[in-house]
Image (cartoon, rainbow, N blue to C red):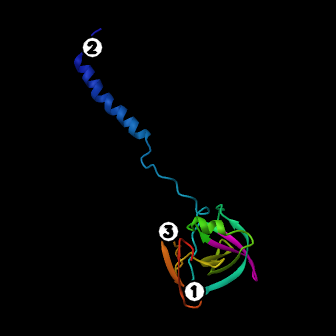
Amino acid sequence: MRRRPLQCVLRTLIGAPSVLLVAILGIPLGAQVAPQSQAERVVAPAYDAAHETTLTGTIQGVVVKHEKGSAPGMHLLIAGSQGVVDAHLGPYLDSDTRTALREGTLVQIVGAVQTSKGRNVLLARQLVFSGCTVTIRNAQGFLVRAQAGRARASKDEKGTETESKGGRL
C-alpha cells in the first residue's frame, strides 16, 4: 500500500495543530491560587495610637502557633490587674527575645487594644522586660523588623540615651 504524498502532508498540516490545540486546552490558563474565603481571611486591625495603654503583668502563656482567626505571629497571655490579656507581638522578634519570653516573666507592654472577631487583643508597640526594651511597632502601628547585629539607640524613662545591639534595647 502506497500512500499518496499529498495525503501525508495534509494529515500532518491538519493533525499537528489539532494535537497542539488539545494540549493547550488541557493546561490551566491562569495557574492562580484560589483566594481564601472571606471567613478565613485575617485582617489586621488598625492601630489607634490615641488610645494607647500600658499593661504590666506576668506572662501566663506564650503562643507561637498561628490560630485561625487571630493575627499571625507571637502572642503573650499576660495576667495583670485587668485579668488575662492577649498581647500580639507579631512575627518579627529576634530569636534571643523569643527565647527570653517565658512563663512567669514580668513584662510591661505599651500598646493599643483592638477588637477583632469579638476578641480583644493588645497590639504591642513596645515591650519592656528584664531591663530590655523592644520596639514591636512604630508610632503608626506598623510592625518593625528586628535589626539583628545593629546598634540602636533610644531614650530610657529618665531621658538618657542608651544603646544596645540586636532587636532588644
Residue 131, how many percent across, how many down? 64, 79
Sequence-wise first label, 1 or 3: 3
Callout 2 crowding tier (Cα within 10 Å): few <14, some 14–19, many ≥20? few
**Badge number at residue 156:** 1
Q: Amino acid at mark 3?
A: Gly
- The residues tagged by marks 1 and 2 sit, at their Cα atoms, a distance apart of 94 Å
Is residue 3 magenta-colored?
Answer: no
Task: Residue at 56% x, 84% y: name it.
Answer: 49
**Badge number at residue 69:** none
Residue 109, how many percent across, how many down? 65, 80
Task: Residue at 57% x, 86% y: name it.
Answer: 156
Residue 14, how many percent across, how many down? 30, 29
Please tell me whether mark 3 sits on a helix, a strand or a loop. loop
- Return the residue nearer the eye: 141 or 43: 141
Q: Tell me the residue that label 3 is attached to.
A: 149
Drawn side of residue 65 relative to residue 169, left or right:
right
Specify the quadrant that holds the N terminus.
top left
Q: Tell me the residue that label 2 is attached to.
A: 3
Residue 55, how many percent across, how many down? 68, 82
> Farthest left residue?
6
Residue span colored magenta: 75-88
